[in-house]
């Protein structure tokens, strides 16, 4: 009996630590999987909002161009304000096209800080041009009051706000994941599971600078 008990004790002494290690590794692995999925989910929400904005911008630009064309027909002289309005709309349209063309594979962006910053920069440029565009539109009370323009502006403003929220949410999820793969024991499991650090999205230095409005003759 003593020999049997001794053998069981030895087996328990060997097996229990192994089981404990397996449980810890399993817990850490599943935890990292969950946090990585949170990052992917936050990224998909951000992409969805970017896509929505990209779809809305051509509509508001078309509305402005149609208004400018109508004004040109009803008012004989071409004003500097109208020229500025069209220039602003075209710059917004160009920035939006650039953002569309800069889209990359999700995994590629999330794993590469440079690509993430480049994408962030193009999207920030769209926001800046949109702000400039709205300031220029202030010179046209009739346009601002039109039902179609108001509806599109409302949708775009809501999308801009949602983009800001989802960017912050994404960075929070990425931070939680990145911390987990750097801390022990997550760092060991991350190496075994090939978990890679996720890139953050940073605001451009010009994001908070005041916009200058210039009217060219």
Image: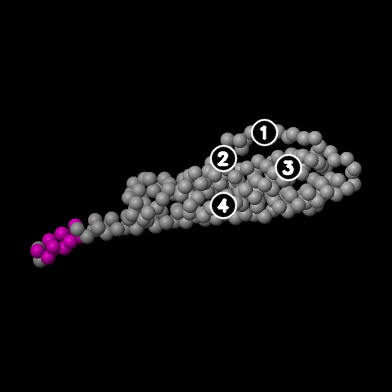
Note whether 87 is above or below 148 in the view shown. Answer: above
Task: Give the mark nearest the N terminus, 3 or 4.
Answer: 3
Task: Give the mark nearest the N terminus, 4 or 1.
Answer: 4
Front: mark 2 or 4: 4
Residue displayed at 77% across by 42% down: 85
Element under disc 4: loop
Specify the quadrant that holds the C terminus.
top right
In the rendered image, which residue does mark 4 sit on?
103
Task: Give the mark nearest the N terminus, 2 or 4.
Answer: 4
Front: mark 2 or 3: 3
Specify the quadrant that holds the N terminus.
bottom left
Residue displayed at 84% across by 45% down: 142
Q: Is residue 7 magenta?
A: yes
Q: Residue 35: horizontal and vertical position, in percent?
A: 45, 53
Task: Give the mark nearest the N terminus, 1 or 2.
Answer: 2
Task: Give the mark nearest the N terminus, 1 or 3.
Answer: 3
Say which quarter of the image contains residue 216: top right
Q: Is residue 91 magenta?
A: no
Considering the whole magenta stretch, tell me its main secondary structure.
helix
Q: Is residue 134 at all visible to an observer of this figure? A: no
Instruction: Identify which residue, 81 or 163, lies in the foreground.
Output: 81
In the rendered image, which residue does mark 3 sit on?
88
In the rendered image, which residue does mark 2 sit on?
203
The residues bearing labels 2 and 4 have C-alpha atoms spaced at a distance of 18 Å
Do tag 2 and tag 4 residues touch (Cβ < 8 Å)? Answer: no
Q: Which residues are magenta?
A: 3-13
Residue displayed at 61% across by 52% down: 100
Note whether 7 is above or below 185 in the view shown. Answer: below
Do tag 2 and tag 3 residues touch (Cβ < 8 Å)? Answer: no
Element under disc 2: loop
């Amino acid at each position: 009996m003593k020999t049997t008990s001794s053998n069981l004790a030895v087996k328990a002494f060997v097996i229990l630590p192994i089981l404990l290690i397996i449980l810890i590794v399993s817990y850490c692995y599943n935890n990292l999987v969950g946090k990585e999925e949170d990052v992917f989910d936050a990224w998909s929400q951000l992409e969805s909002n970017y896509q929505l904005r990209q779809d809305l911008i051509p509509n508001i630009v078309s509305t402005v161009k149609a208004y400018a064309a109508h004004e040109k027909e009803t008012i004989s002289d071409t004003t500097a304000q109208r020229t500025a309005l069209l220039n602003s709309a075209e710059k917004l349209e160009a920035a939006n096209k650039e953002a569309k063309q800069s889209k990359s594979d999700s995994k590629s962006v999330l794993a590469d800080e440079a690509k993430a910053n480049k994408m962030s920069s193009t999207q920030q440029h769209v926001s800046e041009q949109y702000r400039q565009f709205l300031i220029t539109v202030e010179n046209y009370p009739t346009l601002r009051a039109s039902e179609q323009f108001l509806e599109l502006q409302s949708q775009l403003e809501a999308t801009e706000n949602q983009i800001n929220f989802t960017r912050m949410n994404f960075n929070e999820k990425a931070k939680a994941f990145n911390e987990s793969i750097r801390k022990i024991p997550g760092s060991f499991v991350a190496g075994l599971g090939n978990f890679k650090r996720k890139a953050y999205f940073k605001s451009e230095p010009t994001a908070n600078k005041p916009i200058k409005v210039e009217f060219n003759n």
